[in-house]
Image (cartoon, helix red, strand yellow):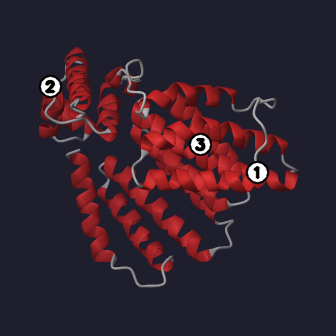
């Protein structure tokens, strides 16, 4: 039986070595890089030695500090050429073709019932919840094509529903592709998801697409742009008539903003966002949340500390 940990260890070592090389070319010490990237010295040491894998936020912070692209450090995508047929990575070429062909109005696939397509989106959600990412990746190409065909062929009054389902499919593609290192495809899927969600009938789905976009910006080290994206998402939430659902979405937006602020090491700003997240979480639930102001402030300290050491 193959040792599944070996590729991950190899990637951790390779990325750590690349960070060390770029740091030295930049004339920075490990201490200096840690300070510029707002990452702990011990994290830099462990990442460079391969003892610890670099999280996407650490890679983004280091890239920002050294003035290079994230892909200069990760040298991704990797592993596609020799991926196991059962792996998530093996599905990427088919996902790429589906994304490239997606907006072709004459896709060579039959139109399928919208109810069945909705069931298949629900199946993606269940697989994702259970961590079955390879199943999600294998299902995405066919589903994206059929949803595009439905979006093109359905009557105008039904296109909004198809657009929302297609936006959901693209959202699954965004996170999977980014995790696997296919940043160009992740950004393309992200643009499609945001455009389709904005054209749908549900403002909360559009706001959620912006929430996902803020995660991409976090991983790219574009923290202030991420905060601006979340500010715009709040304006979209204003259009919702579902008060409790809107409150839950606002809470999630504020929590992601707190993470971005923490990555900027702005504790006061992170505190403020966490207090807002707590307040909106309370409004979005029937039962009182256990996260009060003191809990929110403790979480802020935890978040800032975690991002300093991650």
Q: Around disc 3, counting alpha carbons within 10 Å, would you say few (fewer than 14), some (14 to 19), or many (20 or more)?
A: many
Q: Which residue was labeled with disc 2?
A: 29
Q: Which residue was labeled with disc 3?
A: 170
Could you tell me residue 303's position as x and y percent?
Answer: 27, 57
Q: Residue furthest bottom?
A: 287
Q: Around disc 2, counting alpha carbons within 10 Å, would you say few (fewer than 14), some (14 to 19), or many (20 or more)?
A: few
**Is residue 182 among the parts visible in the rendering?**
no
Could you tell me residue 8's position as x and y percent?
Answer: 25, 31
Q: Separation of disc 2 and disc 1 at Cα?
A: 60 Å
Could you tell me residue 237's position as x and y percent?
Answer: 62, 63
Nearer the observer, disc 2 or disc 3?
A: 3
Nearer the observer, disc 3 or disc 1?
A: 1
Q: Looking at the rendering, in which quadrant would you find the N terminus?
A: top left
Q: Is residue 148 left or right of residue 30?
A: right
Q: Please identify the quarter of the rendering in which residue 170 is found.
A: top right
Q: Separation of disc 3 and disc 1 at Cα?
A: 19 Å
Q: Which mark is residue 103?
A: none
Q: Which residue was labeled with disc 1?
A: 113
Secondary structure beneath label 3: helix
Q: Looking at the rendering, in which quadrant would you find the C terminus?
A: top left
Foreground residue among 95 and 269: 95
Which badge, 3 or 1, is on the more N-terminal residue?
1
């Amino acid at each position: 039986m193959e040792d599944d940990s070996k590729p991950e260890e190899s990637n951790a070592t390779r990325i750590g070595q690349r960070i060390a090389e770029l740091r030295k070319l930049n004339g920075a010490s490990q201490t200096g890089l840690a300070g510029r990237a707002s990452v702990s010295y011990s994290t830099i040491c462990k990442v460079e030695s391969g003892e610890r894998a670099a999280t996407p936020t650490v890679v983004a912070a280091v890239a920002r500090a050294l003035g290079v692209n994230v892909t200069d450090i990760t040298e991704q995508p990797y592993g596609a050429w020799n991926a196991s047929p059962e792996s998530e990575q093996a599905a990427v070429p088919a996902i790429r073709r589906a994304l490239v062909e997606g907006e072709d109005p004459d896709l060579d696939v039959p139109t399928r019932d919208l109810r069945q397509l909705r069931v298949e989106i629900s199946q993606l959600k269940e697989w994702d919840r259970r961590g079955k990412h390879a199943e999600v990746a294998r299902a995405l190409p066919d589903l994206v094509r059929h949803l595009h065909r439905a979006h093109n062929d359905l009557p105008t009054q039904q296109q909004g529903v198809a657009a929302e389902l297609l936006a959901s499919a693209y959202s699954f593609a965004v996170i999977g592709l980014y995790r696997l290192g296919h940043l160009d495809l992740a950004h393309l899927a992200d643009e499609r998801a945001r455009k389709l969600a904005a054209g749908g009938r549900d403002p909360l789905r559009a706001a959620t697409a912006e929430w996902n976009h803020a995660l991409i910006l976090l991983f790219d080290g574009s923290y202030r742009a991420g905060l601006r994206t979340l500010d715009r998402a709040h304006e979209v939430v204003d259009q919702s008539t579902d008060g409790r659902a809107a409150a839950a979405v606002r809470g999630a937006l504020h929590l992601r903003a707190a993470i971005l602020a923490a990555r900027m090491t702005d504790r006061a700003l992170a505190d403020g966002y966490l207090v807002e997240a707590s307040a909106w979480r309370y409004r979005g639930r029937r039962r009182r949340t256990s996260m009060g102001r003191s809990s929110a402030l403790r979480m802020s300290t935890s978040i800032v500390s975690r991002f300093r050491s991650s």
